[in-house]
Image (tube, rainbow, N blue to C red):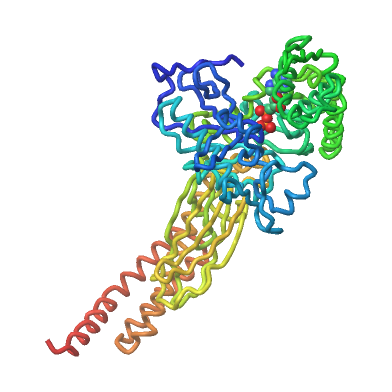
Amino acid sequence: MAKIAINIATGTLQQAEVIVGIDLGTTNSLVAVIHPETGKPVALKEHDSSALVPSLIHFSEGGQVQVGNAAREFLISDPANTIFSAKRLMGKTYQDVSCNAHPLAYTIVDEADKLVKVKVAGKYFSAVELSSLILKALKNSAEHIIKTPVTKAVITVPAYFNDAQRQATRDAGKAAGLDVLRIINEPTAASLAYGFGLDKTSTKTIAVYDLGGGTFDISILTIANGIFEVLATNGNTFLGGDDFDAAIVEYWMNKYGFINSDTAATHRQQLRLDAEEAKKQLSDQQAYESVYENTKLQLSREKLHELVAPLIETSIACCRNAMKDAAISLADIDEVIMVGGSTRMPLVKKTVGNFFGKAVNDSVNPDEVVALGAAIQADILAGNTKDLLLLDVTPLSLGLETMGGLMDVLLPRNSKIPVKAARQYTTYKDGQSGMKIAVYQGERDMVKDNRRLAEFNLTGIPAMPAGLPKVEVSFLINADGILLVNARELRSGIEQSVEVKPQYGLTDEAVEKMLLDSMEHALEDMQMRALTEARTEGEQLLQTTERFIHKNMTMMSREELIETSQAMQALQLSIDMADKNLIQEKAAALNTISKPYAERIMDEAVSKAMAGRKV
Ligand code: ADP
Ligand code: MG
């Protein structure tokens, strides 16, 4: 993908509201946005520098905090106060972290089953706080580059992150002043950056091979009609470019005799940066040479390959396991895409290509690909990408069952998510203490023809006459596509909610069939709805009239009683006959009969009440 330089002087990226995509990496983090002119995602960078911000934080004794490149030099000079790999701590307890074979250079606090904390410069920091410092730095630098406030973001996480780790990432975003609209999987973001899943018609199976600085992930995804599904993930949370660097350092230590010196430890630390530089250069060149303390450091591409081949081989073992879990064959894989800085190594591409039996796709910058995909997702959420229907809109209407089994739609289909809607309902019986909330999805007028998603009872409504309680039912679909239904009786405050995944188990064919059905039955449905409404009104009228007569019988004449009872019977008969016009006619007749005495009785009641009061 062509890189697009951002013209800072003219501020071409200026826009009213941006949603940024953020790759919060273990080793490097970066921010990307959709360029307002080209419509293509770009990684944000200051001038000619790299877009990558090392995920490092240095705390000085004086309380100063430095993030990114500025913190890099302290990795060697002040390791105890320099935090790296904070992402590894997200959602983890001391126990989880301390049993890792790889010790951290900074201090973690031993509180067995509590979330891990880091003690640095005399203060304690949670993983969320540490990540929020990185996110805050990314936010500030993005604002500086695009000259626009940045308050909304999509942040990526590894596909294997559990709920606690995803929530921790969200919290870190919030703490950094970002509204995290969505957390998406890194392999999904990478696939989006490659344009997979953007056209609704294609179905693809993709292997995303992500080799970064300290972690390796392989994910097998299928994309069908714009819906991503992770079939399997595998990997090694302690395998990456750092291990390649360490292998080079060991090789040099031996070759140049540093290993036997008194200052071996210092050499080892200092050689790390040279080793990384050598590794990177050898991705494009055949040989590397530099000078370190009067020693000429040398490394050939061939030697490098010999050193790292066993490490790369362990990643292939993970690929094999992932394929087994996904229960598909190598021939089913349509694309193998390269993610992470370490996939720039020719040997990595070759080995992975050999395993999958096809050339890997590395056409998008592997350092930026995840952030670029997050920017595309952000753009979809902003409503700028129209094609991706199923990812960001409700494919079918969502509503409640109301009287007579009618579907009352709160969120019409194609509502853009996140979205919220609310409506008030009331009871139809005196003293009714519960209300059934049944949630349906579909386009038909009667709920029986739609798909039931959930049902619960709002109980404990205080005794009140029919029609008095106000029950507000709200539907909220968050950006992750989860529907939260809440019912609340406004007078008493009692409430209850339920969470459902409307998309769950819903295939594209199912959606299509429901839409076709609704068109086919449109007329029939309309007639049915009209009948149901008339019937419900008729039944309610019968109930109210009955209650009224029961209460006021002594104030009515015999004729009035007989006439009313006859009209009620006629109305009941028309309801039983399911004849909409007849129901309406008989309901009107009953109203005409009851109106005069109802008014008279009300008047009498009022004057009686007045008479009782001394004015
Ligand atoms: P993460 O996703 O874990 O934050 P990255 O994807 O940014 O990490 O990858 C960082 C790793 O990529 C580092 O180990 C770095 O040395 C390595 N790397 C970057 N460029 C190259 C290159 N040209 N050749 C080989 N390795 C590289
Ligand atoms: Mg990464």
Percent x, y for residue 604? 22, 84
Q: Residue placed farthest to the front in the image? A: 262
Look at the picture and state if 101 lies above or below 39: below
Name the residue at 58% across, 37% down.
Answer: 57
Percent x, y for residue 612? 19, 90
Percent x, y for residue 27? 66, 32
Is the N terminus in the top left, top right, bottom left or bottom right quadrant?
top right
The number of numbered discs placed on residues in the rendered structure image is 0
Decide if residue 413 is in sight here: no
Look at the picture and state if 604 lies above or below 27: below
Look at the picture and state if 215 lies above or below 298: below
Percent x, y for residue 137? 51, 35
| Residue 300 relative to residue 424: left or right | right
Which of 348/46 is in front? 46
Q: Quadrant of residue 556?
A: bottom left
Decide if residue 252 is in sight here: yes
Is the C terminus in the top left, top right, bottom left or bottom right quadrant?
bottom left
Which of 370/587 is in front? 370
| Residue 407 relative to residue 454: left or right | left
Name the residue at 39% across, 66% down.
Answer: 587
Which of 75/205 is in front? 75
Name the residue at 44% across, 54% down.
Answer: 422
Q: Residue placed farthest to the top in the image? A: 286
Q: Residue placed farthest to the left in the image? A: 615
Which of 313/601 is in front? 313
| Residue 606 relative to residue 307: left or right | left
| Residue 496 relative to residue 567: left or right | right
